[in-house]
């Protein structure tokens, strides 16, 4: 497509393209200006609000920026992160596997009927009830928080995997069958590549929901981790520490999202224009 | 997949057919859950783990008000606690809807406003309800205000995102055509703009309600002395597993009833004219599918502008 246009009128195309490029550049520039204006506005508003209400109750961004290095110095920072991430890794890892298995199973109408209510219940119920139920039964033992994380997040994975399977290119699979491509190759070269974007979506959603419920379980039954630290900070009336914990994990999640997941997603899907772009 | 088709085409008769119908599977599910429950009951080393009967008796006593448990002087029973939560949810929900619609419309119409708010809306979306629950408890005390603010903070970002996407998805060519045929503006608004916004507005309502509810109960645990969230925490603190499980089941019943009795019929009615959305997104009550659909939509939109979407939204969307 592009080559034919180029062949016909290279000068016209380049002039047109230049104009479009300039327009685009200006638009991006303007977006950035307004974006920065947004940051400046909200940060200043936050700082002013904290001065009016009182720094102890609503610490401003400056105070929080000072608190985060203090937390790192105190030595609890990395161990808390490690504890929370371990919980997420185990809990969400299991939920992820379970969600994929159920998502694949629900392709059969019988299993779909079987798991339908389970998926709906998991999607509409507050994570609080799973956290409290799991923890009242199992206490500090790992089953409690695993129960809570799995029941909160598995349905997100299931829904995305089921959707991905529904979107599989049936014609390609039929064709590969007709040409006698063996099953293993068919799975590896058609099914897995087409499912991958949905699995990535499931991973991202699951993680963002998973860390919230993980922190919640830590509040109720743990003696380490970010949730525990937040609870302690609240009980000591250290609002700055509470927000510093929340924001530092938030930044961590953002970096993970931007640098790791989106990069690998882009690498993964370079071959597919409509997903990668 | 292939096996399912095969069994379907063979269409066995009588008992095997009943056994293979998805409805049987659906009915079977609660019994499997009960089976697992008993399995845990007989294997767990716990003095407080209840049998299903104990929980059923507890729930019955709560419903009929014959348990004799008085939670506090202000809110004595299940119904009062529930009413308090619902009132907070409704007030917060409407505030979130109004604020979210205004900001969402502005963000959809103007790219500058969008750039201004975007990251902050996403940040709010990604904040766990726990953070503002802990904060609101300290800042506002144990009043109605804290939980209401929590509902607004949880729900508004969803309204904003959905309304913004709705505005961006208005069919420009239809509006252009209507204008060139000199259709009056109020007619365009009523017949083109509103119907195309409606699915997004509906999704906004659904998310905001669900997410608001999830945020509310967490906030009631830490920043309130009444309400449903507080009540389930009451049983947790009392170390009574049957109370916690019983209330968890009340929560599930409430959420399911809301989905099946309110949102599904509403979706059916609102989208009669649009079979595609009706069938694919709403009617199944497939809450997550709508979400990921909206997300994919949003992502496609954003890629064109070269601005990456912070897909931290999870629901969200979720406490």
Image: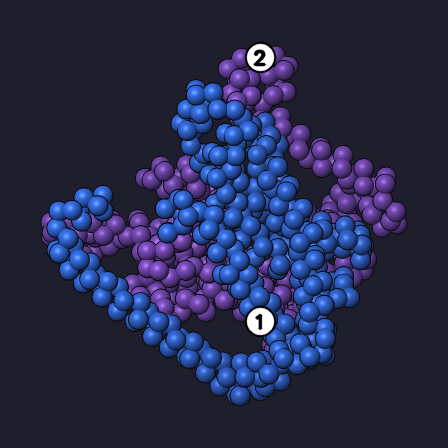
Chain colours: A blue, B purple
Name the chain letter of the residue that bears numbered label 2. Answer: B
Share a chain, discs 1 and 2? no
Looking at this view, is A43 or B93 the one in front?
A43
* Residue plotted at (48% across, 45% down): A197
Looking at this view, is B210 or A204 the one in front?
A204
Name the chain letter of the residue that bears numbered label 1. Answer: A
- Measuring from the top left, give residue A45's x and y in whole percent: 46, 81
Tag 2 secondary structure: loop
- Per the rendering, the mark at residue B38 is none
Residue density around tag 1, few if under 14, some if 14–19, many if 20 or more, within 10 Å? some
Residue density around tag 2, few if under 14, some if 14–19, many if 20 or more, within 10 Å? few
Looking at the rendered structure, the number of numbered marks drawn on it comes to 2
Please indicate, yes or no, whether residue B266 appears anywhere in the rendered image: no
- Measuring from the top left, give residue A49's x and y in whole percent: 50, 83
Tag 1 secondary structure: helix
Q: Which residue is mark 2?
A: B12
Q: Which residue is mark 1?
A: A247
Please indicate, yes or no, whether residue B189 appears anywhere in the rendered image: yes
- Measuring from the top left, give residue A33's x and y in whole percent: 34, 75
Looking at this view, is B4 or A121 the one in front?
B4
Looking at this view, is A195 or B34 the one in front?
A195
Badge 1 vs badge 2, beta-carbon distance below 8 Å: no
* Residue plotted at (70% across, 57% down): A87
On the rendered structure, is B264 left or right of A69? Answer: left
In the rendered image, which quarter is residue A234 located in? bottom right
């Amino acid at each position: 497509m592009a080559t034919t246009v180029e062949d016909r009128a290279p000068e016209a195309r380049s002039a047109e393209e230049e104009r479009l490029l300039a327009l685009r550049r200006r638009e991006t520039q303007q977006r950035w200006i307004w974006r920065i204006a947004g940051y400046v506005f909200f940060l200043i508003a936050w700082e002013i609000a904290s001065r009016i209400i009182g720094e102890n109750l609503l610490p401003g961004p400056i105070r929080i920026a000072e608190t985060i290095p203090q937390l790192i110095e105190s030595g609890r920072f990395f161990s808390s992160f490690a504890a929370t991430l371990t919980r997420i890794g185990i809990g969400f890892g299991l939920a992820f596997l379970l969600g994929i298995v159920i998502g694949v199973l629900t392709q059969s109408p019988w299993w779909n009927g079987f798991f339908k209510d389970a998926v709906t219940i998991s999607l509409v119920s507050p994570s609080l009830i799973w956290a409290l139920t799991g923890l009242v039964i199992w206490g500090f033992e790992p089953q409690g928080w695993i129960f809570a994380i799995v029941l909160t997040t598995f349905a997100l994975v299931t829904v995305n995997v089921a959707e991905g399977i529904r979107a599989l290119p049936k014609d390609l699979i039929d064709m590969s069958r007709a040409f006698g491509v063996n099953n293993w190759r068919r799975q590896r070269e058609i099914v897995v590549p087409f499912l991958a974007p949905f699995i990535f979506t499931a991973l991202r959603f699951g993680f963002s929901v998973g860390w919230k419920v993980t922190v919640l379980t830590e509040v109720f039954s743990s003696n380490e981790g970010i949730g525990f630290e937040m609870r302690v900070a609240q009980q000591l009336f250290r609002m700055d520490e509470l927000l510093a914990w929340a924001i530092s994990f938030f930044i961590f999640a953002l970096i993970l999202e931007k640098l790791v997941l989106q990069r690998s997603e882009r690498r993964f899907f370079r071959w597919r224009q409509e997903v990668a772009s | 997949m292939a096996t399912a088709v095969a069994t379907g085409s063979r269409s066995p008769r009588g008992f095997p057919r009943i056994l293979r119908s998805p409805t049987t599977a659906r009915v079977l599910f609660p019994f499997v859950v009960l089976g697992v429950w008993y399995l845990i009951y007989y294997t767990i080393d716990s003095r407080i783990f209840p049998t299903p009967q104990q929980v059923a008796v507890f729930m019955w006593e709560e419903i009929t008000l014959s348990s004799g448990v008085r939670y506090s002087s202000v809110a004595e029973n299940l119904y009062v606690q529930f009413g308090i939560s619902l009132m907070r949810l409704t007030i917060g929900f409407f505030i979130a809807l109004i604020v979210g619609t205004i900001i969402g419309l502005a963000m959809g119409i103007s790219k500058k406003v969008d750039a201004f708010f975007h990251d902050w809306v996403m940040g709010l979306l990604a904040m766990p309800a726990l953070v503002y629950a802990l904060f609101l408890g300290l800042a506002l005390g144990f009043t109605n205000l804290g939980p209401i603010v929590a509902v607004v903070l949880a729900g508004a970002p969803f309204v904003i995102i959905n309304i913004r996407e709705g505005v961006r998805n208005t069919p420009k060519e239809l509006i252009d055509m209507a204008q060139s045929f000199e259709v009056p503006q109020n007619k365009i608004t009523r017949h083109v703009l509103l119907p195309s916004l409606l699915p997004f507005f509906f999704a906004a309502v659904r998310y905001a309600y669900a997410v608001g509810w999830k945020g509310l109960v967490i906030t009631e645990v830490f920043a309130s002395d009444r309400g449903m969230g507080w009540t389930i925490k009451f049983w947790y603190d009392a170390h009574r597993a049957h109370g916690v499980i019983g209330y968890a089941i009340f929560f599930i019943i409430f959420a399911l009833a809301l989905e099946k009795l309110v949102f599904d019929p509403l979706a059916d009615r609102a989208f009669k004219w649009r079979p595609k959305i009706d069938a694919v997104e709403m009617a199944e009550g497939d809450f997550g599918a709508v979400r990921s659909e909206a997300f994919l939509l949003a992502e496609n939109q954003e890629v064109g502008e070269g601005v990456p979407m912070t897909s931290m939204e999870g629901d969200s969307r979720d406490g």
